[in-house]
């Protein structure tokens, strides 16, 4: 009886003790993290009131052991385990007796073997997308007599390639143009596009700033060239306001006139069929189109021209010789002009006259005449072609999206109302929607759908070790249409570029759209291309409603993305 009374007294004392809220919270947390174990007897004899007691003895609780999380270091898989087509391993011994593939690896015969003839190369990026779909996001292709080639398209992988590149990165050149200059013309270099290392940096240092200044200073003159194209459109369209199927040639004439204006400060008359130089203008345009066409045909496929001149090579060389003759004539004229001035007067002239033509600025910078000739040739065959085809795609997207075109028109008219209807360098800066329209078009149809680099050091991609000296092809057109970075990636939506804060959290957003390349080897003509496209687009949208009523225009690859259909636009007068 004494023990029983003592127990009851202790129980009563416990029930009368004040409860601390912290004790209750800690007890509740302890309950949620413990597993009470009770035998059947103790459960049966426990009063119902006692189950509300917050006091739990450690004798009835088993605390599970918390095992520390062990970090497992993953080792990179060897280079040989990267998936890719096996066909080259079987052909390797035979390939030792055929010419090397071009460094671009754009070989129609090779790709048709990969995909068993189901797709055609040189039409679009489908074949490379086929390889990614079949083998994954990192594809290895065995290179004959050269290092293997890796193909990638994910932004995080492209970021790794660019983050480790040296001060003088190496990219692929265009083999046939190198062969033309070094073997046919006996020039001392293959040209700026094909230069590597310190030679490239030296050319960039001398050309980049004069090029940027010239484009800014020549906006008024480039604007007048756009007016010439507008007048030409009004003269060539039919009763349905539709331009002829060869409208791409008119865009080429516009691009050439812009080139002549900035390079030589000369109005040549490419858009004026009644001028005295009309026949010569036609000859130059035909040479440009021929050079671009046969450059693509010679660069793709097996390069038999390394052994003897093929019919394609002969036509390419004839076209390049015609363009080289024109460029050489202006170089000699500029040399004669500068020889009459002393060096001090040349520098004084350059400081006072910022609106000197680019050719004269390059001569004053003491760039060798042969190097200037090669640089201008690259700008003609690659630069002018890139601008006119990018403009063609932009007009197509605007024609297929009337709502976007109307919004762009409203922006243009609002800005022009403040500048008396004149387009200037400052007014172009006040057109963010126009810039967004251009950027969105370049996302869907970049001029160059692939970027290339030679790795200067070993890196790790997707768990694979990629050794130094590996040639990497980055399919940036596929990259810029990935769902995780762009909502409705196939849709033309310029608005996505107006509010880029939403992408700020993404570390790889800047690598998801690279129409002008990236880093040190990015396009020198970016400013020129953007300015020309902004001027012409603003003028056309201001004057016309642009329409297109035919089948979808896709891209095909001829060293540059070009439209696969005729540009049968309707230009309907606004007023």
Image (cartoon, rainbow, N blue to C red):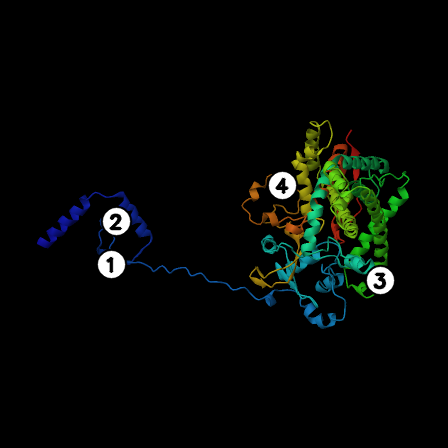
Of label 1 and label 4, which has the lower sequence position?
Answer: 1
Q: Which residue is mark 2?
A: 54
Q: Are marks 4 and 2 in contact (CB under 8 Å)?
A: no
Marks 3, 1: nearer the viewer: 3
Label 1 crowding class (10 Å Cα cut-off): few <14, some 14-19, many 20+? few
Element on which disc 3 rests: loop
Disc 4 to disc 2, how far (Cα)?
A: 60 Å
Disc 1 to disc 2, how far (Cα)?
A: 15 Å
Of label 1 and label 2, which has the lower sequence position?
Answer: 2
Element on which disc 1 rests: helix
- Taking the image as shown, residue 306 lies to the left or right of residue 430, namely right
Marks 1, 4: nearer the viewer: 4
- Taking the image as shown, residue 401 lies to the left or right of residue 22, namely right
What residue is rendered at 25% in x and 53% in y? 56
Of label 2 and label 3, which has the lower sequence position?
Answer: 2
Label 4 crowding class (10 Å Cα cut-off): few <14, some 14-19, many 20+? some
């Amino acid at each position: 009886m004494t023990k029983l009374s003592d127990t009851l007294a202790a129980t009563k004392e416990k029930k009368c003790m004040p409860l601390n809220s912290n004790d209750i919270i800690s007890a509740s947390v302890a309950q949620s993290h413990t597993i009470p174990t009770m035998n059947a007897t103790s459960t049966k004899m426990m009063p119902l009131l006692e189950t509300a007691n917050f006091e739990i003895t450690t004798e009835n609780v088993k605390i599970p052991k918390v095992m520390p999380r062990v970090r497992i270091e993953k080792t990179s898989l060897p280079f040989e385990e990267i998936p890719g087509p096996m066909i080259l391993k079987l052909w390797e011994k035979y390939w030792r007796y055929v010419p090397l593939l071009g460094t671009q690896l754009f070989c129609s015969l090779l790709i048709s073997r990969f995909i068993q003839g189901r797709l055609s190369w040189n039409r679009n990026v489908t074949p490379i997308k086929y390889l990614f779909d079949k083998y994954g996001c990192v594809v290895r292709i065995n290179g004959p007599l050269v290092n293997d080639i890796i193909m990638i398209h994910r932004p995080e992988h492209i970021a790794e390639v660019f983050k480790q590149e040296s001060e003088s990165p190496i990219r692929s050149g265009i083999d046939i143009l190198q062969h033309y200059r070094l073997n046919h013309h006996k020039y001392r270099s293959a040209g700026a596009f094909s230069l590597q290392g310190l030679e490239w940096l030296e050319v960039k240092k001398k050309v980049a700033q004069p090029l940027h200044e010239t484009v800014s200073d020549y906006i008024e003159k480039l604007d007048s060239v756009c007016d010439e194209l507008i007048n030409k459109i009004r003269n060539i369209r039919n009763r349905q306001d539709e331009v002829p199927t060869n409208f791409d040639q008119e865009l080429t004439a516009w691009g050439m006139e812009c080139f002549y204006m900035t390079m030589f400060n000369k109005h040549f008359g490419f858009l004026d069929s009644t001028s005295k130089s009309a026949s010569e203008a036609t000859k130059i345009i035909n040479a440009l189109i021929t050079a671009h066409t046969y450059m693509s045909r010679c660069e793709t496929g097996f390069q038999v021209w390394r052994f003897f001149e093929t019919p394609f090579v002969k036509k390419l060389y004839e076209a390049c010789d015609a363009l080289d003759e024109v460029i050489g004539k202006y170089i000699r004229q500029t040399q004669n002009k500068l020889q009459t001035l002393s060096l001090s007067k040349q520098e004084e002239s350059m400081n006072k006259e910022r609106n000197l033509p680019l050719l004269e600025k390059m001569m004053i910078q003491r760039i060798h005449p042969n190097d200037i000739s090669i640089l201008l040739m690259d700008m003609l065959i690659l630069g002018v072609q890139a601008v006119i085809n990018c403009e063609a795609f932009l007009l197509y997207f605007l024609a297929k999206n009337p709502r976007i075109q109307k919004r762009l028109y409203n922006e243009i008219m609002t800005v022009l109302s403040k500048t008396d209807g004149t387009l200037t360098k400052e007014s172009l800066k006040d057109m963010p929607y126009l810039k967004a329209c251009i950027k969105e078009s370049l996302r869907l149809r970049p001029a160059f759908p692939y970027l290339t680099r030679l790795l200067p050091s070993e890196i790790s991609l997707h768990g694979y070790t990629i050794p130094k000296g590996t040639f990497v092809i980055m399919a940036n057109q596929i990259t810029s249409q990935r769902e995780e970075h762009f909502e409705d990636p196939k849709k033309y939506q310029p608005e996505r570029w107006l509010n880029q804060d939403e992408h700020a959290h993404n570390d790889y957003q800047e690598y998801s759209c690279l129409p002008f390349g990236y880093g040190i080897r990015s396009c020198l003509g970016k400013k020129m291309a953007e300015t020309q496209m902004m001027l012409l687009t603003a003028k056309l949208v201001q004057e016309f409603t642009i329409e297109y009523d035919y089948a979808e225009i896709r891209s095909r690859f001829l060293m540059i993305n070009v439209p696969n259909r005729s540009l049968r636009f309707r230009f309907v007068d606004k007023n």
